[in-house]
Amino acid sequence: MARTGFIQSELDLKLLVLYIMSRAAAPITFLQLLDVALCDAGVDYFSLTQVVSHLVETGHLEQEGELYAITEKGRRNSEICESSLPYSVRMHCDDNLVKLNAVLRRAALVQTDLTPNGDGTCQARLYLADDSGPLMELKVLYPSLDQGQDLIRRFQEAPEALYHQIMGLLASKDLNDGGSET
């Protein structure tokens, strides 16, 4: 059966992967790559798996854990060959990359860690940054892992709200009084 779509060969698929990886804002997982690459009917899971594996073997991509990143060799080859990809495929990829890069940038600005302690408590780390740099890093001791996970979930839903509440509290005159009545 003939393949449909503009991506017809293994070389086309390699060029597509390099095109995507060179424009990703940060290292990405295979599933994120697949999501962006499915912009053309000629892309399928198994072919993409083989191509990504080969690109890692040849030094065009590097893999660390579950994350893939483009190497300098891959970036050079992508720049040289990207015009070989059909314009419509590049435009679909670019649309998908806008969404992915927004998620990746958000993940870089909002970070959380949860470290269990031996006594059943845990330490939650909440980090918020903007384009100019870190805004807040807060470490909180929580009585249980479940409560720590709830804290992290709530923080990830609205980190800016927590930041503004803390800043408002710190700027409050009531805080400076220590709550005492004179």
Image (tube, grey):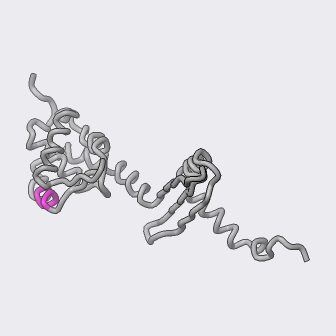
Q: Does the magenta stretch include residue 144?
A: no
- Judged left or right of residue 134, residue 4 is left
* Up-down relation of residue 5 to residue 54 (above or below): above
- State which quarter of the image contains the N terminus: top left
* Up-down relation of residue 93 to residue 160 (above or below): above
Residue at left offset 56%, top offset 53%: 118
Q: How many marks?
A: 0
- State which quarter of the image contains the C terminus: bottom right
The secondary structure that most of the magenta stretch takes on is: helix
Q: Where is residue 149 in the image (x, y as percent from the top left)?
A: 56, 47
- Judged left or right of residue 171, residue 117 is left
Task: Tell me the magenta residue range.
Answer: 73-78
Q: Point out the residue furthest to the right here.
A: 182
Residue at left offset 58%, top offset 48%: 145
Q: Where is residue 10 in the image (x, y as percent from the top left)?
A: 9, 39
Q: Which of 15 and 30 is in front in this view?
A: 30
- Judged left or right of residue 98, residue 19 is left
Q: Can residue 19 be seen in this view?
A: yes
* Up-down relation of residue 40 to residue 172 (above or below): above
Q: Is residue 158 visible?
A: no
Q: Which of 135 and 23 is in front in this view?
A: 135
Q: Position of residue 165 (x, y in %)?
A: 65, 62
Residue at left offset 16%, top offset 62%: 72
* Up-down relation of residue 166 to residue 3 (above or below): below
Residue at left offset 39%, top offset 57%: 105
Q: Position of residue 139 (x, y in %)?
A: 57, 63
